[in-house]
Image (cartoon, helix red, strand yellow):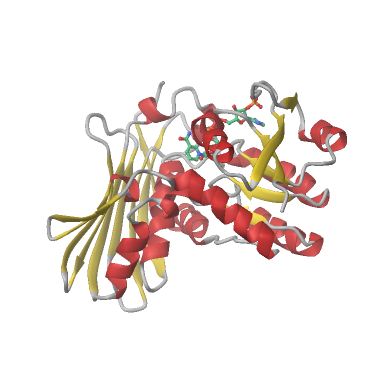
């Protein structure tokens, strides 16, 4: 089968760090065009708008949309309407309703829509899911704390409404939690801390439970300097489970059980090729729904202004 002709829209940090190397290694894809106001990829024909690209390069079969979430719906709608398969970076959109609309459009056009959650493909996530399925979980504690100045320098969009603030990394934790726990969880209370000069939170404290009253506590904070924490801890009848370093290492009762090199984006592109070939979509909105619930149920606290 000939490769899927791919275009990338929104050439920025994550495209350079992850999409380009992963696409280059995957024979199922051939990058043939980009659309970005400023960014280009050497040796690939580039356009400044998706409209110009779709008009000029009808051979495009699929489009990866890697701009900030507030600007993704419009591009996704254009690509799906033109009959292209679409890969959405995380979070898949700025609202639940716009992504639901895209899902219907993809179905009506007979093309695939992929709401990607890269952290679900972290090395130790499946091993953790299997272990948790084999025991009874007593509590879960998520600690996702990082230094926003280090990871998101000069990203104004992330602080604007729809940019999600600390939920931009926090939703990665939620994408893992919603995948590894055997039963659905739902929010029971939350506190969101907003810098007084920003429209998105810098920290969030979230309490969830499931139908069996399993307590799940999540702490997201963007003010962490020094050691960064991307950990999910669970107390179970079979002992203490630690899924650390963003889902890449699993330890049980202090003993390392699983660790492997990071391969999240190569796995995302393998999954995208799989759903395109199978003629289906993969759109799980659970992580985004929890974030929406936090904005709906969470108490707001205003904290010191944040300056880059
Ligand atoms: P970014 O570099 O700030 O933005 C990506 C590109 O989007 C920019 O280079 C820009 O390209 C375009 N863009 C920016 N503002 C735009 C606007 N107003 N309208 C249209 N296009 C705009 O962001 P990023 O870090 O790559 O993140 C992009 C997405 O990937 C986010 O949803 C993020 O959550 C996700 N992601 C990021 C990371 C990471 O480590 N950075 C990891 C995983 C997922 P032009 O100026 O050329 O148009």
Quadrant of the image occupied by residue 229: top left
Q: Is residue 130 left or right of residue 227?
A: right
Q: Position of residue 23 (x, y in %)?
A: 58, 39
Q: Position of residue 226 (x, y in %)?
A: 22, 29
Give the camera-side residue of 258 and 305. 258
Q: Is residue 38 left or right of residue 296?
A: right
Asked whether the viewer can see residue 100, the reply is: no
Q: Is residue 191 above or below residue 157?
A: below
Asked whether the viewer can see residue 131, the reply is: yes
Give the camera-side residue of 285 and 94. 285
Q: Residue furthest bottom?
A: 212
Q: Is residue 142 above or below residue 229?
A: below
Quadrant of the image occupied by residue 47: top right
Q: Is residue 296 left or right of residue 11?
A: left
Q: Is residue 31 above or below residue 248?
A: above
The quarter of the rendered structure image containing the C terminus is: top left
Ligand 1 resides in the quarter of the picture at top right
Q: Residue furthest left?
A: 254
- Residue at image location 46% in from the left, 42% down from the top: 168
Q: Position of residue 269 (x, y in %)?
A: 56, 48
Q: Is residue 276 left or right of residue 91?
A: right
Q: Is residue 217 above or below residue 244?
A: below
Quadrant of the image occupied by residue 202: top left
Q: Position of residue 233 (x, y in %)?
A: 23, 57
- Residue at image location 44% in from the left, 56% down from the top: 175
Give the camera-side residue of 247 and 146. 247
């Amino acid at each position: 089968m000939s490769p899927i002709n791919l275009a990338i829209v929104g050439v920025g940090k994550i495209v350079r760090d992850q999409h380009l190397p992963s696409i280059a290694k995957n024979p199922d894809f051939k990058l043939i065009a980009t659309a970005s106001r400023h960014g280009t990829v050497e040796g690939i024909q580039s356009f400044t708008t998706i409209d110009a690209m779709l008009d000029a390069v009808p051979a495009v079969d699929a489009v990866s949309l890697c701009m900030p979430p507030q600007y993704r719906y419009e591009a996704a709608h254009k690509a799906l309407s033109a009959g292209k398969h679409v890969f959405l970076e995380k979070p898949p959109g700025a609202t639940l309703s716009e992504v639901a609309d895209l899902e219907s459009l993809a179905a009506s056009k007979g093309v695939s829509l992929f709401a990607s959650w890269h952290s679900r493909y972290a090395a130790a996530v499946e091993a953790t899911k299997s272990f948790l399925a084999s025991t009874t979980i007593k509590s879960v504690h998520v600690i996702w704390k990082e230094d926003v100045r280090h990871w998101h320098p000069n990203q104004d969009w992330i602080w604007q409404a729809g940019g999600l603030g600390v939920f931009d990394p926090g939703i990665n934790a939620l994408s893992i939690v919603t995948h590894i726990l055997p039963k659905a969880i739902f929010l029971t209370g939350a506190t969101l801390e907003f810098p007084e000069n920003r429209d998105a939170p810098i920290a969030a404290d979230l309490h969830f439970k499931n139908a069996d009253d399993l307590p799940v506590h999540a702490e997201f904070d963007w003010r962490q300097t020094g050691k960064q924490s991307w950990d999910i801890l669970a107390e179970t009848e079979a002992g203490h489970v630690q899924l650390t370093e963003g889902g890449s290492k699993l330890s049980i009762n202090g003993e390392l059980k699983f660790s492997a090199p990071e391969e999240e984006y190569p796995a995302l592109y393998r999954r995208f090729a799989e759903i395109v070939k199978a003629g289906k979509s993969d759109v799980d909105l659970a992580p985004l729904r929890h974030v929406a619930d936090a904005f709906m149920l969470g108490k707001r606290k205003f904290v010191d202004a944040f300056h880059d």
